Amino acid sequence: MGQCRHGVGMAFLRLLAIRLLTTAITLAGVAVIVFVVIRVVPGNPIAMMLPPGATEADIARLSALYGLDQPLVTQFGIWLGGVMQGDFGTSITSRQPVLDLVLGRLPATLELSIMALVMAVILGGAAALTGTRFRGGRREGAIDVANGMALSVPDFLWGLVLILLFGVLWPVFHISGRVSPALDLPFTTNFYLFESLIRLRFDLWADLVAHMFMPALALAIPLAAIIGQLLKQSLKETMNLDYVTLARTKGYGETRVILREALRNAILPTLTLVGVQFTFLIGGTVIIERLFSYEGLGNMAIDAVINRDLPLIQGIVILFAVIFTAVNLIVDLLYAVLNPRLRHA
Amino acid sequence: MHLNRRSLLKLSAATMAAGTIGLPTYAQAIDELVIAYNVNLPSWDPTVGPSAVNPTIQGLYQSVFDQYILQQPDLSPAPGLLTEWGWNDDRTQVWMTVRDGVTWHDGSPFTAEDVAWNLARVAKPETGSPIQFVWGTLANHRVEGNRVIADVTQFDPTIFKWMYFLTGYVLPKAYYEKVGAEGFEAAPIGTGPYMVEKFERNAFVRLKANANYWGGKPDFDTVTIKFVPDAAARVAEVESGNSHVTLEMPYEEYDRLKGGPLAGVAAPISDIGMIFLNDIEVMTDPNVRMAAAMAIDKQAIIDRLLSGYGVKIDTLQTPEYAAYDASITVPYDEAKAIEMLAASGYGPDNPVKFKIQTTRGFKPKDYEMIQAIVGLWRRVGIEAEIEVYEIAKHYELRAADQLAPAAFYNWGNSVGDPTTSTGFAMFGPSPHSVWDGEDLIGMIGPLWGEADEAKRIDGWKAVDKYIADNALVIPLLQYVQPILHAPGVVVTPHASGSLLPHLMKRA
């Protein structure tokens, strides 16, 4: 038994080591690709800031000022050397350290993504459970239709619909921003939603939720549809298994059978999917944050691209890559821990 | 407190209601003005970096900082921090008289030292001013009482115009030296009508009225400017009453809302739409250029695509500009265009072919306008292939003189001088020009340093006439900026396109 546990532990550590190594290689690859690609595509920051009347000498002076007169390899070496020491450079447009800018905005994006994920799980879970409970009936049909609609409409269009409904026709939620400008924020971190709860400042919490509700819901709706479909399918398959039939013969009601017996086994594939989809959800924040003027990484990323702010684009992409690979790593490891076949392999 | 599901639901509903109850509506009297602005503010230093030359954020800067010279809503200059200015007789020196009694937002006095320090700072290449080539024409800045004197190293007749144009702002010497560039970004101060109270990057800036403002305290004590880049969200902001004022929305939306619960003002601004012609391929043929220019029905495009919001132009000057000449016209004449193409062997059956580049969505209906123009050209025997590109690519191609034979662009010139429109757009050696004809270079060259103002302006008018007669560029229209606002606020539009809260009053 002890040897078996030791063997499992070694296998897990080996898996962890391999995944960490591939993560490091992935990040290095992303760093090279983003550095090269954003310099190869047309449009450079110097051309963007050329005033009327600038001369060739002005172009050369500004290029030198921002280090863009160096060969590409030299630029990459300088940037990589800085990154290794935690210096991601300085934003060309805002003249602030890139690391400060991206880390300052990351909490806003994470809170929005997590809120969207929670909404998606609640909505998708409710749809799956209701559809399973009333399978074969009109309600399941209605849920399938709603799922189809939710999946086929992209998140930014849901955002526009929500703005029209809850921003204009029935203006109960804020259309733009993360928090009302008039409020004094006592926060010491940028995790406003989390910190407002810790500090029991429900007034601020409500204001934050009133700002985040629509963007989070717009992000959540397509994901909720995916969760709903997958979970319902898993539940329906589980409902035909022997142990579920046994539960019914014991006289348990259908709802109890679903919630107490079937859900536990049916939820595993959905949990894996949720982990993977979370990374896509963070990617989706780019458009949604812009639409709702939400002060997260995505909104900042669009400005960085428009202004060809090369150091900032690099910083944001690298951070997104770190998040993606970290989430994937965690999902892989969790799957290894939870899946009995992999655990005993 | 015992929390159960019901009480939790009640608490959530109550807190949600508390959070949303503060939403303003346009029916209420306006205590705190809220503006939904169309771009983000990347940096608070209006003198260096790319933000300094970004025309769309100059209105934000002008709320906090003063320029050396005030620019009035009709683009004309007026005494600002400088009350008088000029050259000495032989134009080897400039002098500026500095306004007395002005204070910085921290209460310290504004002095002539501040002006001299600012001018010297942006003249140094290492400061990173994109306009250093202008400020560098002054040197040896010195203070004599409330006057600033500087030596002219290269005479530029527009130097004082730059003092109310891009980067022409006055920053506080003592404060800037004390806090440094990063400290200034974190807590900027100026002498302007509003003081920065709170700034959240990519979200909003909250401004407090400067009670000591030399131009008089603004009408609204508090102004919040939300950065809402998406046009649909901006319209929703004012439609829902979340914001009181917004700008730059589709003209259809403007027409829909201005007659309802919202008021609107749409005035021409200093931005123009134009088609650069590069002197390559078929564009070296004057018949092709002239035919291309005369085949465009500009008024029809304005009426049908821009709901009538636009002013037809035939030179790179708008009526507000110093060198505008209404007598220079390029008629819409389809028959003449066909005739000119025929003279070069082209026609509907044997069309002349070239590429035209355009942005899509960068300016209102830009792509649609080019589609319409290509349609008009097709009727006379011009077959143009449209290439859509990003504005960043346009800048790079233009700087490298690699634009297609035709390329749509919008040119801003909020100072209204011909050097910063026709001059930089059409002078071959300029990185902004793609027309390299020696004849034009010869005409423009002497005007850069022309000291006689009337002669200078006449010279530019002659250049514009030459350009129009030879179709070296195709000016299309002057843009009109739509502004929607709640009925409780009166908005004064500025011809530069800047939306200035201190020009807004309670109705």
Image (tube, coloured by chain):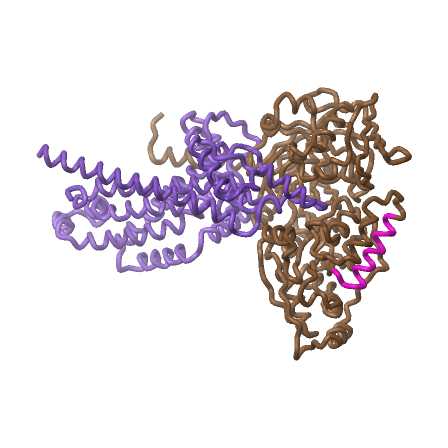
Residue found at x 44% / y 31%: A86
Image x and y of residue B181, in percent: 61, 28
Residue found at x 75% / y 70%: B287
Residue found at x 51% / y 39%: A311
Task: Inspect the magenta stretch and tell me whether residue B172 lies in it.
Answer: no
Task: Please state which of residues A79 and B105 is positioned toward the viewer in this rendering.
Answer: A79
Is residue A63 shown left or right of residue A345?
right
Image quarter of the N terminus of chain A: top left
Colour seen for chain B: brown
Colour seen for chain A: purple
Magenta stretch, main secondary structure, is helix
Residue A15 in sight here: yes
Q: Residue furthest bottom?
A: B349
Residue B476 sits in which quadrant?
Answer: bottom right
Is residue B236 shown left or right of residue B135?
left
Image x and y of residue B372, in percent: 65, 66
Task: Please state which of residues B484 and B190 is positioned toward the viewer in this rendering.
Answer: B190
The residue range painted magenta reads B456-472
Residue A336 sits in which quadrant?
Answer: top left
Image quarter of the C terminus of chain A: top left
